[in-house]
Image: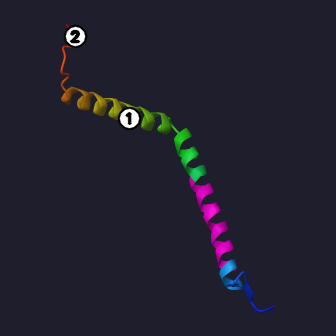
Amino acid sequence: MTGMEDGLPLMHRRLRNAWTAVHVVLVLAGAVALVVWGSTDGNAERLWEDFWGGLLDLQHRVASLISWPWPWND
């Protein structure tokens, strides 16, 4: 054994595999934390309602800035 695999040192492969495992654990922990936070006290519902209300407000503001070249509410 020469300490190489596919032209890369074995230590590189080990570190890459270790980082992949750590990264998967961190992403899963973050997802679990987000789900727990969202299901606590209606946090996700409140966040969605705030986002949706802001989006509709932005849509209304942009639509009111655009004047149509024809009358639309005669």
Q: Residue at x 22, y 10 (%)?
A: 73
Which residue is at 41% across, 32% downward? 49
Q: Label 2 is placed on what type of residue? A: Asn
Q: Is residue 53 above or below residue 10?
A: above
Residue 17's quadrant in the figure?
bottom right
The quadrant of the image that shows the N terminus is bottom right
Question: Mark 1–mark 2 contact, CB under 8 Å?
Answer: no
Give the residues drawn in magenta, as a range.
Answer: 14-30
Our reading of the magenta stretch's main secondary structure is: helix
Name the residue carrying label 2: 73
Q: Position of residue 59 (x, y in %)?
A: 30, 30
Outermost front residue:
69
Residue position for label 1: 50
- Within-10-Å neighbours for mark 1: few <14, some 14–19, many 20+: few
Residue under the image location 19 percent in, 7 percent down? 74
Residue 15 in the magenta stretch? The answer is yes
Instruction: Give amino acid for label 1.
Output: Asp
Q: Is residue 39 above or below residue 31?
A: above
Q: Is residue 23 left or right of residue 56?
A: right
Of helix, strand and loop, which one carries label 1?
helix
